[in-house]
Amino acid sequence: MHAILSLDERARADLALLLNRAAVFGDGSVRLAADGDVALLTTPMTASSGLLDSGPTVLIARASRMREPARFDGVVALTALRDALREGADIEVPDAVGRPAWAAVSPPRGGWTATGEVEAALVRELASQAASDVEAALPRSPGEPVRRRAERAVWGRSVDPSGLTAGQAAALVAMRFLGEAPVRVTEAGGWMRASGHAGEVLAR
């Protein structure tokens, strides 16, 4: 197995669209990991910058089946990956060096325990409320750093008995991961996972 992300045309278009939506959040980096024929893409909506940062980490995640097995775990620039997907070339995943703090800690692979389900309509309401709470906390004409701090203060809050956070609700809506079915919420090792119709959002 080798460090090549090889996807069919439909999967490429799907991930390119996802990255286009994710580009307005996070730090512009994407983690790609695989050990077999499924690649997991994660990118931050917001992320802790290190041990002294007590704010939330909210990761957008999507699994894609590859055309052939591979083994890799690396971080690439979001815009470069998006452009490569659009151009149709296979993507060589670099060795993991100098990765950002959010990509240095992986959610558990197993041991997830169900904590509840949240109706899609309620998730949309919770996301709308989170957006309102952020706006209410902002001064007039806030700069980007001020807005980011306000978002992080709101997004870390648990907003449902299942443990779903405001940041997860916001990400599920922004990334269009919701369908008609309820969002499944599970927990493992301090992480909460919200699984929608078209992707997952991880938070801790």
Image: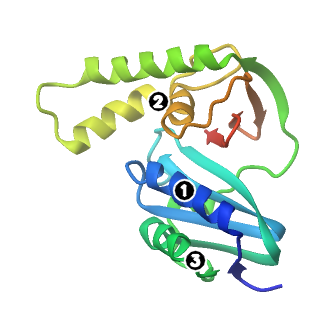
Task: Give residue 97's quadrant in the image.
Answer: bottom right
Camera-side residue of 25 and 119: 119
Position of 144 relative to 91 (above/below): above
Circle 1: residue type:
Trp
CA–CA distance in space, label 1 to label 3 = 28 Å
Percent of width and height locating residue 40: 71, 60
Q: Earlier in the sequence, mark 1 or mark 3?
A: 3
Q: Which residue is pictured at 59% across the width and 81% down the height?
A: 89
Q: Which residue is pictured at 27% across the width and 17% down the height?
A: 136
Helix, strand or loop under label 2: helix
CA–CA distance in space, label 3 to label 2 = 35 Å
Helix, strand or loop under label 1: helix
Q: Is disc 2 in contact with disc 1, using a CB cutoff of under 8 Å?
A: no
Kindly tell me whether residue 49 is visible in this rendering.
Answer: no
Circle 2: residue type:
Trp
Disc 1 versus disc 3: nearer the observer? 3
**138 relative to 6 in the view: left or right:** left
Disc 3 versus disc 2: nearer the observer? 3
Q: Earlier in the sequence, mark 2 or mark 1?
A: 1
Task: Tell me if mark 3 has few (under 14), some (14-19) or many (20+) residues whose alpha carbon lies within 10 angstroms of its own.
Answer: some
Percent of width and height locating residue 125: 51, 14
Determine which residue is flagged by label 1: 102
Q: Quadrant of the N terminus?
A: bottom right
Q: Which residue is pictured at 51% across the width and 51% down the height?
A: 44
Determine which residue is flagged by label 2: 155
Any mark on residue 88, and which? 3
Q: Earlier in the sequence, mark 3 or mark 2?
A: 3
